[in-house]
Image: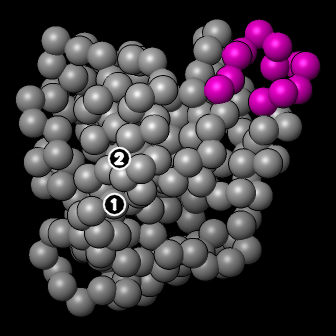
Amino acid sequence: MDLGSGRLHDLFKWSGIGYMIAIERDPEAYEEGRKVAEASYHATLTIDYIRADLTKPEHIDRLISSVPKIWSVYCFFAIHYFTGQKEDFDQIVRLIQAKLRPGGRFCFTCFSAEKIQALPKEINFGNQYYIKKKYDDQKPGFGRKIGVYISSIGYEHDEFLVYSETIREAFPGFKITRKNFSQFPRAPENEHDRAFSFLNDLWILIKPA
């Protein structure tokens, strides 16, 4: 199950699997992704593409009652949209806890809150990226907003920091592995790409059997 699937332009990352559940809230992204999901060149991959708002309890209730138990949940560069307020984050946690099989894994990527905390109020990475802190409270918690600009997107968007304490409290008993992007091979060659990339972490959480 892929949470915050977007327009499904990166289906190559699911090469080799036969079935996935993709969930997206944005109507424009959903319509474009629906066409991709139906395309013949993805015939080897069956996709249940669902439009749902993962912050709404009634949508979570519907998903819990309708989708099967699963072995893997992914949320790549999207979990930060759920940490604006605890009530929103609690809903996505409820879905994962309900549908992930014992021994299954929840994987997600996001900025390292600790690394962002250590940065100046605003930092530029050449003309390619910048990050602006829009919060004053330095304690871990919900609602710590940052503005992020990525030149390939072309505009600044807001997201929220994801703290280690938040994850560990939400998933007690899970085996948790956290790796910074600097630990992976094939680092970006450009220094600005590399510096921006290394602000991110991959989290892997395994549900107790």
Q: Secondary structure at mark 1?
A: helix
* 45 drawn magenta: yes
Q: Foreground residue, 190 or 129?
A: 129
- Residue segment shown in magenta: 37-48
Residue 93: where, in percent of width, then height?
28, 43
Question: What is the distance, in whole Å, between disc 1 and disc 2 at their CAs?
Answer: 7 Å
The residue that appears at 45% across and 18% down in the rendered structure is 68
Residue denoted by label 2: 92
Left or right, 158 with reference to 51:
left
Q: Which mark is residue 88?
A: 1
Q: Which quadrant of the structure image shows residue 103? A: top left
Measured as percent of width and height from the top left, residue 158 is found at: 50, 75
- Residue 105 seen in render: no
Answer above or below: position of 130 versus 79: below
State left or right for residue 79 relative to residue 5.
Answer: left
The reply to whether residue 68 is in sight is yes
Give the amino acid type for the residue marked by disc 1 in the picture: Asp
Image mark count: 2
Give yes or no for residue 173 being in the magenta stretch: no
The quadrant of the rendering that contains the C terminus is top left
> Do callouts 1 and 2 mark residues in contact (Cβ within 8 Å)?
yes
> Three-letter amino acid code at disc 2?
Ile
Question: Looking at the picture, does residue 168 appear above or below residue 115?
Answer: above
Relative to 91, say whether 9 is above or below: above
